[in-house]
Amino acid sequence: MPVVLAILSGHNELFMDISRYLPSSVGMDFVAIKTLREHPTQGETGLVMLGWSAAVLAGALVTVKRRDT
């Protein structure tokens, strides 16, 4: 996904904004000592990672519930 968004970011700024909030980018910003102005802060990156984790766990819960019935 990051590679596809990097290719598409040359066509539209929206793709660059989306790529900043992917887990790989957010993880690097979370542990960085200094971040760029256009990147999310460390507090924001923690919340984004929490959101990604909640989305994955919700998907797993739905999958398990459907397969167990």
Image: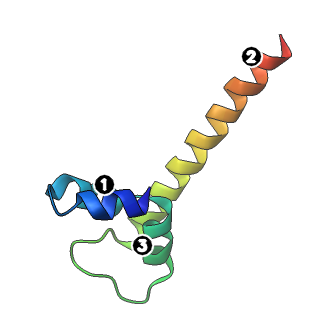
Residue at 32% over, 68% down: 40
Above or below for 61 versus 49: above
Question: Relative to 60, is 53 above or below?
Answer: below
Marks 3 and 1, how far apart in space? 17 Å
Packing grade of label 2 (10 A; few <14, some 14-19, many >=20) is few
Q: Amino acid at mark 1?
A: Ile
**SS class of the residue under badge 1?**
helix
Q: Nearer the viewer, mark 2 or mark 3?
A: 2
Q: In terms of secondary structure, where does tag 2 sit? A: helix
Q: Dot 1 surroundings within 10 Å: few (below 14), some, or many (20 or more)? A: few
Q: Quadrant of the N terminus?
A: bottom left
User: Residue 18's mark?
Assistant: 1
- Foreground tag (3 vs 1): 1
Measure the C-alpha gap from mark 2 to mark 3.
Answer: 36 Å
Q: In percent of the image, x 42 and y 76: which residue is there? A: 29
What residue is drawn where x is 14% and y is 55%? 12
Image disc number at residue 42? 3
For label 3, the SS is helix
Image side of residue 21 versus residue 50, left or right: left
Q: Is residue 51 above or below residue 25?
A: above
Quadrant assignment, res 61: top right
For disc 2, the marked residue is 66
Amino acid type for the residue under numbered disc 2:
Arg
Q: Position of residue 3 (x, y in %)?
A: 40, 63
Among the 4 quarters of the image, the one containing residue 13: bottom left
Look at label 3 and name its amino acid. Gln
* Residue 4 in the image: above or below residue 51: below
Residue pictured at 37% horizontal, 57% vertical:
4
